[in-house]
Image (tube, rainbow, N blue to C red):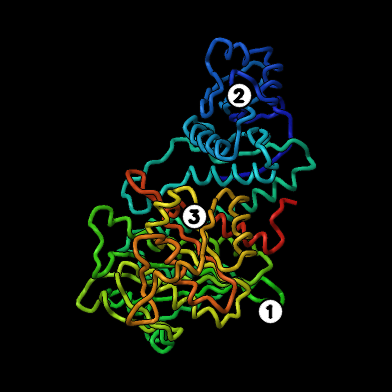
Amino acid sequence: MEFSVKSGSPEKQRSACIVVGVFEPRRLSGTAEQLDEISEGYISNLLRKGDLEGKSGQMLLLHHVPNILSERVLLVGCGKERELDERQYRQIITKTINTLNETGSMEAVCFLSELHVKGRDIYWKVRQAVEAAQDGLYSFDSLKTRKAEARRPLRKIIFNVPTRRELPIGERAVTHALAISEGITTCKNVANMPPNICNPAYLAEQAKILENDYDNVTTTIIGEKEMEELGMGSYLAVGRGSVNESLMSIIKYDGAADDSKPLVLVGKGLTFDSGGISLKPGLGMDEMKYDMGGAAGVLGAMHALAELQLPINVIGILAGCENMPSSNAYRPGDILTTMSGQTVEVLNTDAEGRLVLCDALTYVERFNPDAVIDVATLTGACVVALGAHATGLLSSHNPLAHELLNASEQSGDRAWRLPLWDDYQDQLESPFADFTNLGGKEAGTITAACFLSKFTKKYNWAHLDIAGTAWRGGKNKGSTGRPVSMLTQFLLNRSGQEQGE
């Protein structure tokens, strides 16, 4: 799909389709009013007859509107004008793109980007429109022998901006959105891949592809032999029951001219999580291929970063591993020695993500990082607490937490901060080791982060629990591509390129 911006009057647009908004009750937007005037009341006459009320998501496709150069006019219901918010705007854009894709219009000029969304500027509206369009058109069909294809799919969409002065802002928004969408697509493709294909070695291959595609990206793969030499006993224990070797992929992006401290993103990469000896229930276990959603999100963010060529240094870690039951698997009751030297009593082998992450978080100390963010589908408790709408955010560093919350609001990829008080640390006490890998039923998301915090004392750190946001289950199951948008926005902000100017 090709995206661009322009500034022009609706009556001068010669296109397969022109898209304008209608508010409740049958109130034309400014652009729709212009078309109505040119067409001598043709549109308003239709509305008076009850063809469209203007409710959010309603669509009415018109052909051969009098005095209009475009072949078609698509009227889009936008709800009540004063109630048009960010969520509704994205939903309207998604439905508009899907409708256009079914009309036979191979190109369109869209004036919805001129609608007033409270507190949002033209950069936000254009960027969100492009991201929503790309998201709506995504499908994972690479393993299907028969692929559904639209007869005349939409190939080009132009978003209109009010004045020529805003063209550079709109163009910047398109550039950012396309890079982020590429990262989201990478995340989705890897996460949706079945676990018989997507194992730790596959994750490493995807990391190598980034190295091949971008001159300032280098990738290093650490296997089990080197992990053993490093003393990563916790990470190694989790993968011991699988025939697939645990591999940690280190993606280094050099964007700054100086040797400034890097930002580090660490992604949990459990390419399949059976629960190990503490076996999960069979129902829904197929979705445990998404337990590498953190690694997929980091890979996607690194892809977007490399595409944008931001002037910062960033290191992405894909902590690849597979948790399987076997005669060689680690057990409840085992005591593991982590790379940090701290010991952990295993109470449940299904609390494995933190055992992989803790060694990865110790490993990244060598980079002298400016900040470290780990991303993980870590706890079912986070799904219970926040559902599918917000990522759980916990941090030992208030400024970093505020940066991430700000990025989540800017991008629409929202997060919510949970407490990380010392009061919760008591739940991890063990009579036999330094602490356990499980804090009990209460505050499971928080105690998991408390566990990780024990390995992050030497740098500023934040933890993103994406268990509820990384994928959707059920009939329409699939990766959401989150939190690529939030992470990329964070990197844009850090590089000083967050504005569309």
Badge 2 crowding class, 10 Å Cα cut-off, few under 14, some 14 to 19, many 20 or more, is many
Q: Residue at x 40, y 53 (%)?
A: 383
Q: Residue at x 41, y 60 (%)?
A: 443
> Residue 294, located in which quarter of the rendered image?
bottom left
Disc with the residue nearer the chain's start (2 vs 1): 2
Examine the rendered structure and indicate whether residue 276 appears above or below residue 72: below
Q: Which residue is mark 1?
A: 259
Disc with the residue nearer the chain's start (3 vs 2): 2
Badge 1 crowding class, 10 Å Cα cut-off, few under 14, some 14 to 19, many 20 or more, is few
Q: Amino acid at mark 2?
A: Phe
Examine the rendered structure and indicate whether residue 407 appears above or below residue 474: below
> Residue 395, located in which quarter of the rendered image?
bottom right
The answer for how far apart the CA atoms under marks 2 and 1 are is 53 Å
Which label is found at residue 391?
A: 3
- Label 1, secondary structure: give it: loop
Q: Is residue 479 visible?
A: no
Residue 51 position, x and y percent, is 52, 15
Q: Which residue is mark 2?
A: 23
